[in-house]
Image (cartoon, rainbow, N blue to C red):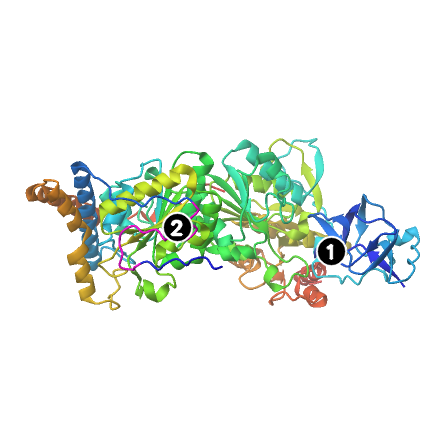
Amino acid sequence: MAKPTTPRADSAKAKAAVPAGADHNRPRPETPTDYKASKEELLEFYRQMVLIRRFEEKAGQLYGLGFIGGFCHLYIGQEAVAVGIQSALKPGKDSVITGYRDHGHMLAYGIDPKVIMAELTGREAGISRGKGGSMHMFSVEHKFYGGHGIVGAQVSLGAGLAFGHKYNDDGGVCVAYFGDGAANQGQVYESFNMAELWKLPIIFVIENNQYAMGTSVNRASSEDQLYRRGESFRIPGIQVDGMDVLAVRGATEEALKWVQGGNGPILLEMKTYRYRGHSMSDPAKYRSRDEVQAVRENSDPIEGVKKYLIDAGVSEDEIKVIDQDIRKIVAEAADFAETSPEPEMHELYTDVLVEQY
Amino acid sequence: MGIEIKMPALSPTMEEGTLAKWLVKEGDEVKSGDILAEIETDKATMEFEAVDEGKIGQIVIAEGTEGVKVGTVIATMAGEGGEAAPAPAPKAEAPKAEEAPKKAESGTSKLASEAKATVQDPDLPAGTEFVKTTVREALRDAMAEEMRSDPRVFVMGEEVAEYQGAYKVTQGLLDEFGPKRVIDTPITEYGFAGIGSGAAMGGLRPVIEFMTFNFAMQAIDHIINSAAKTNYMSGGQMRCPIVFRGPNGAASRVGAQHSQNYGPWYAAVPGLIVIAPYDAADAKGLLKAAIRSTDPVVFLENELLYGRSFDVPKVDDYVLPIGKARIMRPGKDVTLVSYSIGVGLALDAAEQLAAEGIDAEVIDLRTLRPLDTATVLESLKKTNRLVVVEEGWPTCSIASEIAAVVMEKGFDDLDAPVLRVTNEDVPLPYAANLEKLALIDAARVVEAAKKVCYK
């Protein structure tokens, strides 16, 4: 007799979902609940999300002015994902890796906006000394391992970082972020297989912003409910409202509990949306302005936190102070990035190899 | 009519093996598929199955016999209703040439001919003892020594642990270091090359074995985009100290997809170290150096050399410098530059040339990136003639690179154009005669050397 099939989840559903019927005998993580944030925590979430938004807007401007070249992928609209997840991690213990849309994750991990912006403008003071650029930024000190330009590579590399946590028995967890586009890469599944086989401490986070460059999820993915992509490897998946920082944080807490309990990897699908094009050079003709506008009006992650703050008794004036403070930080970062010197010519030849042969 | 059961060839390169155990005895009835015996090759112990039905007549080769040549009659069997064939005389152990199965002389069998280096690395104390060691053992010893001294070192790949290595290079490592540090992977090169690279970025020292480098093409993105570029892209912040190792180049009769030399491919990439040793001492000393290096290393071995024995100095910690070529044989008339299996051919050619009055100097590059051009140019100053010997394609090869370097930096020292002796510019064919035609041999090296000497 055939096993009962898994009912197709409602694609509009944004809260955590667990597929019913699929291998129900296996233990599964609990359905996460929204994180109960204190007022201080909410203020910090707001501050970080606004920092990312203003930073990215400024990066867009600098790109338009020719200060930033090449590819530049902005995180606007997705702020709740990085902030909600990063806030649950232990800096210096847990490791993080992501793809090329990496500015937001670095800011959420407390890395100085100046050195990030200076990297975008290709300056000596940049976090990669101007040799990496927007897509290739790292901070080993913060256990932020990049910043990778090849779609999906960070998933295998992240499994390697998780392998290291297990090998060293250091109690750390790796969070590997990737997009709905990367979710179709073969190496993702090779890594899923080994991560579950070896019970590696890793949280796979699919930031499903609905479009892999110009191709919508439905046009690229035979199973468009991406949280189910780990099921055949026995990796449980949870679908999360990635526009709500408290839902993101709540799901991350549950995921950490699962992974730290020695259960192996878990998959979080963050349903989110990017307001800007795939990169600065993307005219975004594949979707209507109305679609973008509707998301901005109905589910903007920053407006969401603002509501939580007001419910918690924070005044508009207090919020304005934060906004002004952030504008100042971003303006300073931009000034720094515009005025810092470019790398010295001899830097062309440094860091190709570590050792001398 | 009796049937002769002959020693089977159980791998493309097998020439002899050990008859480890008989699982049948004289008089037993066997049918097709029954296991007759266990045969040990240099790579693995294999079960040998009966193809025909019948009764075992006489067991000719006793169990435990080592060095049984492929094609030797090991037992006789009576066919359906027939008598057992009379046992061949004992001397049949070494079958006459025409009785041996027609194992075509493949293009690669000649590559593995014996030739000795006449010059040792200079930095060994006088009186150092040398131990005959196979390249396979030398590689294993290098890994084991480094694993003993550095807990960050681990080995990962297909069949490296429980199977003891597809080519037995990792034999014994699982027993000594356990499954935490000797890790069998699924057949997913891209995935485990990425996991290895990520582990290296996180501070471990992975040794990633590819069953052969042909399969590493599935993983080349991580070798180049993840491992080689990270240090540069991060402004020196994030390192990737990893070794990717495995057999490279033509094996024997395995066809185009399993026979190519990736030396020039990886040597083209800044940020990588590329090593391709020839003998066992270099295999050991350079693999130890590779594992200790903070840079990502592609370590290209050669299947045909695995079983060959060379002298390895018996010293506590034999580590060789990366990026230094070695003069294998000094000479004054012509310089033969090579690496990996080509070095053996160049040494063979040098012997033949000596008989004809041409004194050839043989240089083993050992490291392909960074290339030790100084040693090559220094030799050229003396000989004024140069031939590059490379078991690989000619186009955009290491040979091309050497020719370019010599043009740029050694032009005034040249008395003749640099010649390249390489494989033919075709995918490697299967047919024995065509394979032989496609691959380099000592005769071609001799011919080229005479040509540059105008003799």
Q: Distance between the residues labelled 2 and 1?
A: 54 Å
Label of residue B410 in the image = none
At label 1, which amino acid type do we have? Leu
Q: In this view, does A187 lie to the left or right of A176?
A: right
Residue B75 lies, in percent from the top left, at 85, 53
The residue range painted magenta reads: A10-26
In terms of secondary structure, where does tag 1 sit? helix
Of residues B91 and A173, the one drawn nearer to the viewer in this rendering:
A173
Label of residue B353 in the image = 1
In terms of secondary structure, where does tag 2 sit? helix
Residue farthest to the front, as pictured: A1
Residue B283 lies, in percent from the top left, at 62, 44
Q: Is residue B210 left or right of residue A267?
A: right
Report the mark closest to the observer, 2 or 1: 2
Camera sees residue B225: no
Residue B225: in magenta span:
no
Q: Do the residues labelled 2 and 1 touch (CB within 8 Å)?
A: no
Q: In this view, does A50 lie to the left or right of B202?
A: left
> To which chain does the residue with label 1 belong?
B
Of residues A190 and B357, the one drawn nearer to the viewer in this rendering:
A190
At label 2, which amino acid type do we have? Gln
> To which chain does the residue with label 2 belong?
A
State the residue at coordinates (71%, 62%). B455
State the residue at coordinates (40%, 50%). A155
To which residue does mark 2 refer? Answer: A154
Q: Residues within 10 Å of mark 1 (few under 14, many from 20)?
A: many
